[in-house]
Amino acid sequence: MRILVLGGTWFLGKAIAEQALARGWEVATFNRGRSGQDVAGVQPVHGDRTVHADLVRLAQDGTWDAVIDTSSSELAPRDVLLATTTLRDQVGRWVHISTVSVYEGWPHQALTDGSPLLECPPDADATYGYTGEDGSPTLYGFQKAGGERAVTAAFGDSAAFLRPGVILGPGEYVGRLPWWLERAKRGGRFIAPAPAKQRIQPVDVRDVAQFALDQAASTTSGGYNVTHPVGTSFEEFLSGCLAATDSTGTPVWVEPEVLKEHGVAQWTELPLWRTHAGVWAVDSSRAVDAGLSCRPIAETIRDTWRWWAADGRPVDHPRWAEHGIAPEKEAKILASL
Ligand SMILES: NC(=O)c1ccc[n+]([C@@H]2O[C@H](COP(=O)([O-])OP(=O)(O)OC[C@H]3O[C@@H](n4cnc5c(N)ncnc54)[C@H](OP(=O)(O)O)[C@@H]3O)[C@@H](O)[C@H]2O)c1
């Protein structure tokens, strides 16, 4: 197989490039050279995918059996369209990394791969869509839905859309699992969002990468929810963080009403905590039938801590700063209970 990874230096794209090389595939990557190092063994091409001339230069290195597009998280549909139309004749198949945010019903309703999507034209610019008052739908969701349309416009049935919920694992830069690991390591009593039995469905970046490569080599099409089919409870998740960091910290389960009273921001101040009914009710059975295999979350937690601790807390990213509750605010809430 000869594949092109759009991205390829950062979190998911990096995991995809590494695993494709391990399969013995020929791998080209395309990025601006800003976010990370090229993986040893790939054929790197540097350029900006929003610049037509850069894509034309990239196309000259084709052909490829498949593209895996990991680099559209901040791009408008029209930018995705520029890449799909410019590369169309050089590529057999397009595997697009999308998100569960493309669904109209997320995070309020339980979802399948057939649930209705947000409406967004394939040539929309970066202003199309909006973010609702309670954080749903999101501008991001509209834009990613338009990105899917841009892929379909050029590749039709030769396209697959992978829709992860939350991706964790080594290399995570957002600050979700690393923040919980750091909090567990610090020890003492710490806030845990009740109910303890709430199930969550984060998926390991290496399992998403594996599935993306399988899709690149297959002939299937359409959308796949890429969420952990079994998941874990928040209680097991935090026990995993305590075990991985060898900590004696104690979670104190705090009811959602109390957290809301204190103005604790869902999703960010307590990462992975969100009370909407559909957040963790995403059915991934189509992906599982197509080969998605998810490791136990305890393994994701352990390996993330190993990476995080070994690399000396390596992340410097704007999204990191948005995550985690301030120690003073946490102490104040605990004291009030
Ligand atoms: N992280 C999650 O929990 C999560 C959940 C659901 C879905 N997703 C989706 O998963 C995908 C991968 O996410 P990620 O967090 O691994 O990576 P990301 O931050 O979305 O992508 C970064 C990669 O894209 C390259 N890139 C960005 N802009 C570019 C441009 N204009 N031209 C060329 N290359 C460009 C970057 O390299 P340079 O900066 O060097 O150019 C880097 O290699 C995204 O599409 C995201 O929407 C992520």
Image (tube, rainbow, N blue to C red):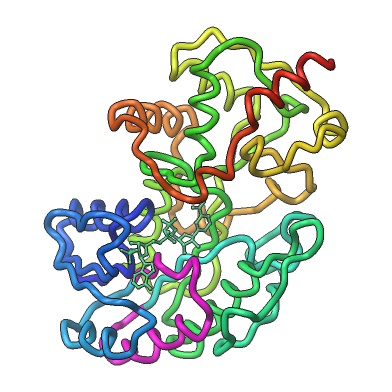
**Residue 109 visible, this orientation:** no
**Residue 124 visible, this orientation:** yes
The magenta stretch is 68-93
Ligand 1's quadrant is: bottom left
Along the line of sight, the residue nearer the viewer: 2 or 312: 312
Q: Residue furthest left?
A: 41
The picture quadrant where one finds residue 263 is: top right
**Left or right of 168: which side holds 283?**
right
| Residue 255 rendering spot, x and y as whole percentages | 83, 27
Residue sitting at x 68%, y 35%: 199
Along the line of sight, the residue nearer the viewer: 237 or 54: 54
Picture quarter with the N terminus: bottom left
255 falls in the magenta region? no
83 falls in the magenta region? yes
Along the line of sight, the residue nearer the viewer: 192 or 290: 192
Q: How many marks?
A: 0
Residue sitting at x 32%, y 58%: 35
| Residue 178 rendering spot, x and y as whole percentages | 47, 33
Residue sitting at x 19%, y 66%: 27
